[in-house]
Image: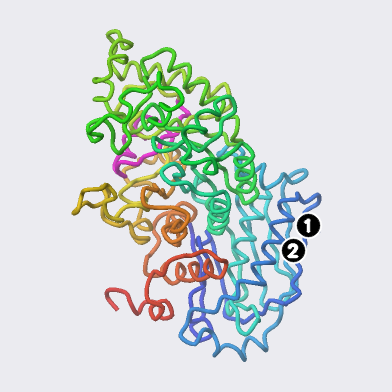
Amino acid sequence: MRVYKVLLGLSTLSSFAFGLWPRPKELTTGTTPLRLSSDLSISLAGVAGAPSDLVDAVKRTRGYLKNDKLQALVPDRGSSSKTAVSRAKALRRLQLKYSGQGKPKSISEEAIAAIDTRDEAYTLTVPADGSDAVLTASSSLGLFRGLTTFGQIWYDIDGTSYTLQAPISIKDSPAYKYRGFMLDTARNYFPVADIKRHLDAMSWTKINTLHWHIVDSQSFPLVIPGFQGISERGAYNKKAIYTPADVKEITDYAAARGIDVFAEIDTPGHTSILHHSFPEHIACFEASPWTQFANEPPAGQLRLASPATVNFTASLLTAAAKLFPSKFFSTGGDEINNNCYKQDAQTQTDLAGRTVDQALDTFTQVSHNALKAAGKTAVVWQEMLIVHNVTLAQDTAVLVWISSQDAAAVAQRGHRLIHAASDYFYLDCGGGGWVGNNINGNSWCDPFKTWQKAYSFNPLANITKDQEKLVLGGQQLLWTEQAGPSNLESIAWPRAAASAEVFWSGPGGDVRTALPRLHDLAYRYIQRGVKAIALQPEWCALRPGKCDLDA
């Protein structure tokens, strides 16, 4: 049970939402106005040997404090508080203090450490009398999370940053270790700059994992040393690729912002694109009608029963895994089409009396053993565990996506799970049908998944007390049949912040009180250059509760 202490004054000076997102574990506020000095100092004197990425994070925080200029979301945008703010004490220094043992590690090193070892806890105190604010943590990652919170406290009146709710005391840590976002860059390509901007937005809500669904049947933009021919023949064009240097740029950028990046190369399904470079390994390539051979076009799956294909896949995954520092690597395993293998003469010969699931078991064990030898822990979609009779190492993490109800079946088998339920977290749902010649078509996972739906999710539903330790956390997902660089931000934000709070703060949040804070976050994102969509008319955003159904 997480404790929330929120003591807010009832005067008009504090009538607007205190816009922290995700909400801290413990929060106490007052009713005293406090200005932020224009020459605020953020001191690292209490962090001996501060790592360079923490120094950089402090610089970025200074930039946000200077440039956010977010006005309070009230009808007069805070102007009635101007006199009180002008008379307020000024905060001149934020002290960072490292309370851990030995020399602090970098944010980057801590962000990609084994998930069970990460420490993101921090405390933050902001006095009302202008004396130093203090941010304390036993890790650089914790200090970084605290800086993110500090940057959300302040509003702007005519160039003066202020809060009306000092003193502020926060004690915070996440409910779940894994808080993610999955981005598909195969159906449509996203330039490196767009991914980096998205990583910034993720970090502002303390999301700590990018699940990068980097390739699929439609395109293979990842340049893998030793297998360059795949991207040469499988990318949409010569520029729509991710070179090893690009991958390093993205993973380094993410790690410095407290985000681990793990890649997915889905196998044995979703691999049609490999035919262009290794046709001998692909069954039912672009078979028609595609609806009989795949969940979406183009059809094509790895010949999982072929010893040559098994070894090829293990080598490909090993080479790809070396590009990513994360401890996780996903081999996918969803939506395997049995008819594809039934109609493929080569696969029928290679099966030699075995079932497809028996061949899949061998295929998976070889691939996962190769990843283990490379220092990786496998991640799979749920079918590998609860549909197919596949042997999985006990540390394999399982993505629960078909239905939130399936989490119980994964937990019953003793595997760690990541919530990725399509009935709560799929951002592409409700966008209408994208398949051509289908006038009345809708998305398969209708309806549109609102932020309120995601926010209502309970990670422990149907999970026993003994199984709770198996829940790593969860993520929202963007499959990009109808998404690209032009609408990534508007699809993702601020909706993706809903799961960020569920898995940082724990379940049980009230959508009524969350909405004003989420408005606040969305407006702050816009100030930082992210094209977050409006959740309601601005009239509603400025008048919390007035547009509730029962208002």
Is-magenta flag for residue 409? yes
From this viewpoint, is residue 1 visible? no
Q: Quadrant of residue 276?
A: top left
| 263 left or right, relative to 33 | left
**Boundaries of the magenta span:** 394-416
Question: What label sits on residue 95 in the rendered view?
Answer: 2
Tell me what residue is drawn at x 51 percent, y 33 percent. 231
Work out whether 503 lies above or below 354: below
Q: Nearer the viewer, residue 355 or 196?
A: 196
From this viewpoint, is residue 99 visible? yes
- Amino acid type, label 1: Gly
CB under 8 Å between discs 1 and 2: yes
Work out whether 481 lies above or below 73: above
Work out whether 381 lies above or below 76: above
The residue carrying pointer 1 sits among few (fewer than 14), some (14 to 19) or many (20 or more) residues within 10 Å by Cα, namely some
Residue wearing tag 1:
46
Choose the circle earlier in sequence order: 1 or 2: 1
Q: Quadrant of residue 549?
A: bottom left
SS at circle 1? strand
Q: Nearer the viewer, residue 377 or 6?
A: 377
Give x and y (percent) for residue 78: 54, 85
Q: Nearer the viewer, residue 348 or 322?
A: 348
Tell me what residue is drawn at x 60 percent, y 33 percent. 323
- Amino acid type, label 2: Gln
